[in-house]
Image (cartoon, grey):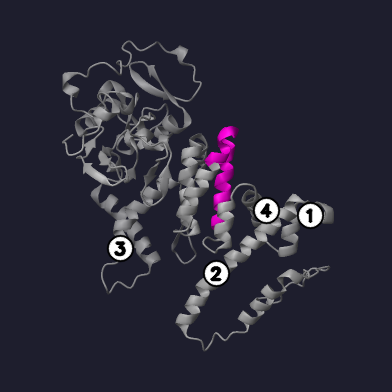
Amino acid sequence: MNTRLPASPHGLRARTQPTTPRLASLLEAVDAALALETETAPPRLLADEVVALFAAVNRIHAMALTRLARVDANGVAALESGSSTASWLRHHTGLPSGQASDLVRTARELRASLTATESALENGEITVHHARTIARTARLVQDQVRPESAGAAVAEVEKVMLEVGRAVDAGSLTGFATRVRQVVDPDGALTDSNRAHERRWLSTSTTLEGMVSIDGLLDAEAGAVLLTALASAATPLGPDDRRSAGQRRADALVDVCSYALDTGQPSTSAGVRPHLLVTTPLVAITGRTNENTCPAEVAEVAWTGPLTDEAVRRLACDAEVTRVVLDPSSQPLDVGRSTRTVPAHLRQALIVRDGGCVAEGCDRPAAWTEAHHVVHWAEGGRTALDNLVLLCRTHHRKVHDAGWEFTFIGSAWRLVPPGYERLRYPAPESPLPDPGANPRSDEVGNPGSGSAEQQLPGAGEDP
């Protein structure tokens, strides 16, 4: 193996450090702290110093961003080098291009409207990563609301995110910002969700040693399914279980696959739903608000966080639903029993009628499908054969997230892409029943009959 390294490129010049008389005392204090002994100091003392030093770093970041905002506002970079402030910062500090640009945008936001965030950073209460997340979220809010209400909206978002940021790490605040995005820009959140789904992939290959390499990327919903399946099977078997976390996850994946193969039911999951624990306000399913619903609430799935409203509606098509009544402080007051949106006997009838996914050209069998309400039960659609079809998960997503529609072909519903020429086929002889019509006697008590509120079991009631 050749261990010779390439020579340094010609023309490299080390970055110079400017003279800063006003910061002389700060730099002297840093030099003094660097001279302190660490090898013989008590570890507990060093632990406290670690926390204090990181708080000091945050305060120094605040000072740097305050000055950076003034540098940017006065066009220093353009006057000195004819470049942008981000390029100037990258050149003089060695920061990556993306991080330099983000810091410039953050400095602008702190100077313009996020004075409380700037103060919290100066006091060491949050990190610069918190500040960057708050600034990005504030820009999003400002772009999505009317100009006359932008100031109040940004102030409210800053207040809430600062309250959260003071208590959680920067990564958790980023997750909370996703919830804010869901509320402020639901269409954009749905677009991002669909883009993430399109980026999914899974690769398997055999190594020279005969092992199997697995790599891939899943969207939040699919990732939640995988993590939920692995969680129960990846727990340590006892105090003598010396497997690493990665080894336990690998064994759990094999156990889940082996169980599916051993039982001969590799896809019965679609018949026993839900696999995911989704917590959602009713408004996410119905799309309707009233005095008892808070539009700032968003649906969340265990493991991966917020879900779009369309994803919730898709999952709710064929699931077990439990109504939980909360008090004003979001504490549960009462919990009803779970009820299935599509009972087992109706699913069996669907299997006999549809055989599998009804989308044109799709050969997915019934075991790989989910029951879909053509008119969603939250909109008054009945849970009855004439309002239900079987769809594989791919085509179910296309209906809810990509605008695919149903048309009546022959004597059954078929799924077609947006803009499909439906005039080629005769209109259905029996159109879907009026959502407001009274259900048939054999449908009384089925979820999906009547309004969304009537379909869910009341707190403490049987479905």
Relative horizontal placement of residue 73, taking residue 361 as reference (left or right): right
Q: Position of residue 188 (x, y in %)?
A: 52, 37
User: Along the polypeptide, which appears first: circle 2 or circle 3?
Assistant: 2
Seen in the picture, residue 120 relative to 315 is either above or below; the reply is below
Q: Give the spatial CA distance, label 1 vs label 4.
A: 12 Å
Badge 2: how crowded within 10 Å, few (<14), some, or many (20+)? few
User: Along the polypeptide, which appears first: circle 1 or circle 2?
Assistant: 2
Residue designated by label 3: 235
Q: Nearer the viewer, residue 124 or 426?
A: 124
Residue designated by label 1: 77
Q: Quadrant of residue 59?
A: bottom right
Q: State whether the magenta stretch is mostly helix, strand or loop.
A: helix
Q: Nearer the viewer, residue 144 or 393?
A: 144
Residue segment shown in magenta? 130-153
Residue designated by label 4: 104
Amino acid type, mark 2: Phe
Amino acid type, mark 3: Thr
User: Along the polypeptide, which appears first: circle 2 or circle 4?
Assistant: 2
Amino acid type, mark 4: Val
Q: Position of residue 376 (x, y in %)?
A: 34, 27
At numbered mark 3, what does the secondary structure look like: helix, strand or loop?
loop
Q: Residue at x 18, y 27 (%)?
A: 445
Residue designated by label 2: 54
Q: Give the spatial CA distance, label 2 vs label 4.
A: 21 Å
